[in-house]
Image (tube, rainbow, N blue to C red):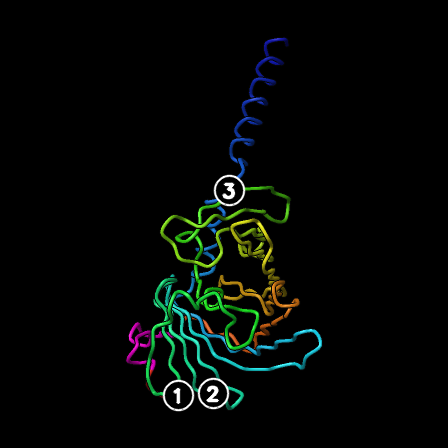
Amino acid sequence: MRTFAVTFFACGAALLFTTMAGAQALSGDEVVKRMDEAMTRAQDQSFDFDLITVEPGKGERRMTYHVDIKGTSFRRVEFLSPGDVKGMRMLVVSVNQMYVYMPAFRKVRRIASHVRNQGFMGTAYSYDEMSIVTYGDVFSAKLLSESDKDWTIELTRRPGQEFSYPKLKMVVSKEYSQPTRIEYFNDKGVLLKSEDRTNYECADNLCNPREMKLVDHTRNDLTTRMVRKSWKRNSGIPDSFFTQRALQKAS
């Protein structure tokens, strides 16, 4: 009987050890890798958004735009309204290589690095926040905390990367493997912007938020909301769509 008890407890301890090892916390970099994979799982994705910007004491400004994403870096944005921005397009080839097409000039111009942190079209978003698709190639990460529902990680810009923010703090949902909150800091640790991504919807093994809200704390808490109006997946968009030549052509 004693031998059975010893064997039973030994097996139980071994099982507990195995379970604990299997439940070992992910590292920050592993969380980012999981997140990047979840956000780029589709062959391509297309969205239509309402873009609503409000600054305290000033009127509301609304725009609509269409965005196509492919792979881990390609992104193309086209503004649909109002009339003063209609036809403007932006192409992202990588986080360090972005182009803009202005209908008035009928030319494609590369976006200089020194303007990438400026407000994009008067919104709270900058070119950098509009352009980034994956985070692991730009940031290393460490795990700060973990709960049943999410991970909280700190991201530090990798050497040689030109992204405007040296540090981010991010809350990543375990259900969606995507961020629900992002905080953007300067090199002194001052919070510059904060973003919330809410109302996630999932289809075809993909998930995306219906709404994103970014607050610029350096501009009197100017706030821009992106409200998703449509979402298409795996439409077969060719690589040639994400070129400077295609950017000049009408849709």
- Quadrant location of the N terminus in the rendered image: top right
Give the tally of numbered discs.
3
Q: Is residue 116 left or right of residue 124?
A: left
At x 42%, y 74%, the residue is 68
Choose mark 3 or mark 1, whichever is in front: 1
Give the labeled residue for mark 3. 142
* Viewer-side residue, 96 vs 141: 96
| Residue 240 is inside the magenta segment | yes
Q: Mark 1 points at which residue?
A: 103
Please determine whether, in this image, residue 57 is positioned above or below residue 218.
below
Residue located farthest toward the right when viewing the structure as drawn: 57
Task: Say what secondary structure mark 1 lies in.
Answer: loop
Real-space Cα separation, disc 3 to disc 1, in angstroms: 43 Å
Q: Name the residue under label 2.
A: 86
* Magenta region, residue range: 235-247
The answer to whether 150 appears left or right of 112 in the picture is right
How many angstroms separate mark 2 from mark 1 (CA)? 8 Å
